[in-house]
Amino acid sequence: MEVIVIRFSFHNPTKIHFGQAMIKMIGKELREAGQHKVLLICGSGSIRANGVYDQVCNSLRDNGITWIEAWGVKANPDLEKTREIINIAKSEAVDSVLAVGGGSVIDTAKAVCAGFYLSDVWDAFCRRAEILRALPLYTVLTISATGSEMNGNAVITNEKERKKWAISSLLLYPKVSVVDPDIQVSLPPQQTVNGALDAIAHILEYYFMDSELHSTRAIDTALIKSIIESTDFLIRNPQDMAARANLAWCATLALNGISGAGMQGGDWACHQIEHALSAYNPKISHGEGLGVIFPAWIEFMAERDPIRFYQWAKQVWNEDTPSMGVKRFREKIKAWGSATSLRELGFQEADLPELCNILSINPMIGTLSRFGTSEIEAILMLAY
Amino acid sequence: MEVIVIRFSFHNPTKIHFGQAMIKMIGKELREAGQHKVLLICGSGSIRANGVYDQVCNSLRDNGITWIEAWGVKANPDLEKTREIINIAKSEAVDSVLAVGGGSVIDTAKAVCAGFYLSDVWDAFCRRAEILRALPLYTVLTISATGSEMNGNAVITNEKERKKWAISSLLLYPKVSVVDPDIQVSLPPQQTVNGALDAIAHILEYYFMDSELHSTRAIDTALIKSIIESTDFLIRNPQDMAARANLAWCATLALNGISGAGMQGGDWACHQIEHALSAYNPKISHGEGLGVIFPAWIEFMAERDPIRFYQWAKQVWNEDTPSMGVKRFREKIKAWGSATSLRELGFQEADLPELCNILSINPMIGTLSRFGTSEIEAILMLAY
């Protein structure tokens, strides 16, 4: 490994209120920031069942905030829905956005915050337009997974064009996010696991980069191990509130800048490949897709450059070789009831060329290695 | 350990530019924020010798920023000097402050930022006045130790009254801090070690609190071990730039909110006791004082509540008992050439009652245990 200068900037202005009963802070924060008319963006309605919606409305009401509601954001949020909500935001002339949901709702809300000031929001995803202004965003997180509650990234799927693309801006960092792990107690186990896999994948995107900032890697090891331990606890007992809290905080730290400090921006090949999977079939959960792709990617990369993967195998899995690390990683994913192959996700071998086609739209996949079609094919075969 | 609800807020808006040649960013940041007339606060002149002063002036000049200079802040910065600089700030009507130095310079600068809007800054330390406004603060860090570059705390010594007291405010977080570990290469080994001990002590103030947010403790373990490893490297080779970078980043994370997330504010008994040491004799370095007090505190506490200290002994020192952990901690401090007893710091047994008197001004010492005079005496004896 050649010596590479350690140089990075870190700036994360999001305020987090973490813990039980913190939802009541959201109305106060909006009021103190001088917001009057909020666009509340929500998913499919689970927040009505678990009481979160009522808690949010009470907090808004108590603080004299008026709001209008946009419901129906789904997993792998799509462009058409986003445009629809932007139209509501514009016609209602809201002054702020409050996302109540998981990463899909928050990402949609970020696109709305940016799109409010653009003629078409997809221009920002295509880099045809720059994000120069955005509505202030507030969030109440209902599932720990994407880390979107404490960063400026949003991923939206253009279903027509089968493109799952991202925007990123300092303007899109939430002003305030509430993370109350207690409200996640009603999540189905598979969603908890999807969240854990997503968070682990975020950390792994940074973990293998060339960097001598070993302290970041030591923190990352601690985060991955905490996520694994917490998820194990939650599989046994979904009501383990300490495990919920640890998983939630680790998932936030997994993509708020801490896990990637000094790691040269990360690799992101696995995320690009997974985005193609869910662009191909939006029913595939992002976390589950990553759980299929990441072990295959490590397997592929470690054959070419084993040294890079020894520390991960040792520190995370207490194994002496990368291949044993991959084996343990896949066993863990399987034990959590999640897919470990494209086949289990419903793909057939005949689908792989089409996946490669979707991926070939991207001018480059990955940072550590720039993948061409043959490498992508090889990884998809290992994942199949 | 009873179950305690995990609840905390995290908000750290400071932007960090980390790495070689990042000093050039400071003028640009001031210009982009619309600052015109900056008060440059500096220490004793070492920044003239190592080129940092020239780099800062060039960056200011290149960006059209005018500045005036206040020199001569010393370690354990005192109130009189702070008041003197506040008078300069007021009479020159500066619009911002740029601290170039270590924790003492930055803490003085924070007191200046707050004191600019107060009739007497000490009122804020005595809680007679609230900090409602502050000048915007920018910093260029020259020694990694206090973490002051990424938090809102400042500690100032009132030498006349032998009080070393603190203020804390969101308004005092630096807007931008530059951390260039390369400029620390010229530090004497003892200063590097003092910084490492200060950073370790910050983490330990949180480490032993009752909290089930074990992920924070796992991160803290990673930070402590990285600091120890980096300091070991730097004792052997002060030019090990990767070790400088790791030590620097860990010291920033040690007191920026990450190391204490969910840890109920920390204990801070050791810091209070150490503050009495350096209020008694301002020549004692804060880090070295902490290196004497913290092992004695653990020794004292672990006799009463050993379970609390097992994990630290195991995870940090790979030892099976707290007392063996303390032994290894003291051996490490000794190996780094730092004092392990009050005697080595120049105290005599006859000084201990007077130290107790200074400490008795504080209505309470510590959080885990509230210490009275007899407990303080016992810890000082263990430290002696």
Image (spheres, coloured by chain):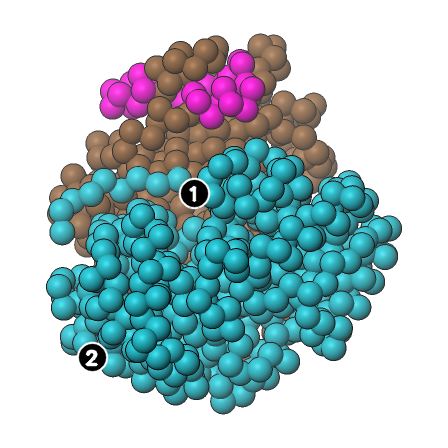
Chain colours: A brown, B cyan
For the residue pair A372 and A79, the one nearer the viewer reads as A79
Q: Who's the residue at 29% across and 54% down the image? A: B366
Image mark 2: chain? B
Quadrant of the snapshot with the C terminus of chain A: bottom left
Amino acid type at circle 2 is: Met
Q: Is residue A323 in view?
A: no
Image x and y of residue A98, in percent: 47, 24
- Going by the image, does B353 lie left or right of B44? left
- Going by the image, does B269 lie left or right of A152? left
Image x and y of residue A375, in percent: 51, 64
Residue B383 included in the magenta stretch of the image? no
Q: Which residue is mark 2?
A: B324
- Going by the image, does B122 lie left or right of A217? right
User: Height in image: B181 above or below B238?
Assistant: above
Q: Are marks 1 and 2 on the same chain?
A: yes
Q: Who's the residue at 47% across and 33% down the image? A: A176
Callout 1 secondary element: strand
Q: Earlier in the sequence, mark 1 or mark 2?
A: 1
Q: Is residue A176 in view?
A: yes
Q: Who's the residue at 25% across and 23% down the image? A: A50
What range of the chain is rendered magenta? A27-55
